[in-house]
Image (spheres, helix red, strand yellow):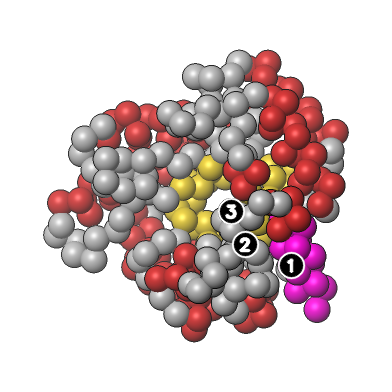
Amino acid sequence: MSQMTIGCALWTLGPTPTVSALARQMEVAAETGCASVQPWIVNVEYDPCILDPEVGSAADRREAVKIAASLGLSFSGFCAQLQGAVTWGGLEESEGLRWRIEKTKQALDTTAELGGNIVTTHAGVLPEDKSDPSYQILLGSVAEIAEHGEKTGVYFALETGQESPQALGDFIDEIGNPWLRVNYDPCNLLRFGSEAGTIQGVRILGDKIIHTHAKDWNPETMQATCGEGLVPWDGYIQALREIGYSGALAIEDETGNEDMIDSIGRSYKFLRACLND
């Protein structure tokens, strides 16, 4: 049986403009019991990121690696989430596209420098109609980035969003590069789909799934502490076991709770109990 581990998506704890801020977040994750962390790796206007080469130095990045090792943490992946004029990712938007492609490639390079091998992102909105010009733009953008990932030894993982798992899988198959994979977020699929689809999506995407986010969804309370929403965790984790997934369940807490550390701790305890069943 595959053995999944529990990690933490560090942006849950806020921005990381300095090495010390990143170190504190990694300390919280380690104290919670997490085996890995997923940091942000690109700078955005409102949230400077020390791991972005345009913000931090190579020495800063080496220090981050040392701190993680000293805490017994690995990097499950890194997040290179950019934004277009209209959509998260914007890899289907013409305006500013070349910059976003090159910036994502830079994130793959930085990930390799840090000893990681997975970069996740929402690439943009996948049109249902393949004749839509934005579909072709997205196809070309993602294919180019995946090709760069192949050269650097870093997987480019598209996060599940508003499209169906089948549509996402077909898109990846059309590109046909094994370095293009999936970051599976059950909360996103439940929010825009159904409980059955959240579980079935795992089986549809299968070994394309290389990383996951552990996040919950409750449309009434808007709370997302794992186990306190509507994500069908038992069926979801069983489906992951069936496909042989042995990667991280990276806690991504979007509750906005005043005590985020407590919320992450509750998520960790819940997920640990699920994995021990």
Can you say whether 237 is above or below 108 in the image?
A: below
Element at label 3: loop
- Can you tell which mark lies on residue 214? 2
Q: Residue at left 43%, top 28%?
A: 45
Label 3 – label 1 distance at C-alpha: 20 Å
Q: Does residue 268 show up magenta in the picture?
A: yes
Residue 256 tag number: 3
Q: Are marks 1 and 2 in contact (CB under 8 Å)?
A: yes
- Number of other residues with Cα within 10 Å of mark 1, as a class: few under 14, some 14 to 19, many 20 or more: many
**Residue identified by numbered label 1:** 271
> Which amino acid type corresponds to the residue marked 3 in the rendered image?
Gly
Q: Is residue 265 above or below residue 205?
A: above
Part of the protein shown in magenta = 264-277
Identify the residue shown where x is 38% and y is 58%: 172
Which kind of residue does numbered mark 2 sit on? Answer: Ala
The crowd level at tag 3 (other Cα within 10 Å; few <14, some 14-19, many 20+) is: some
Q: Residues within 10 Å of mark 2 (few under 14, many from 20)?
A: many
The residue located at (79%, 30%) in the rendering is: 67
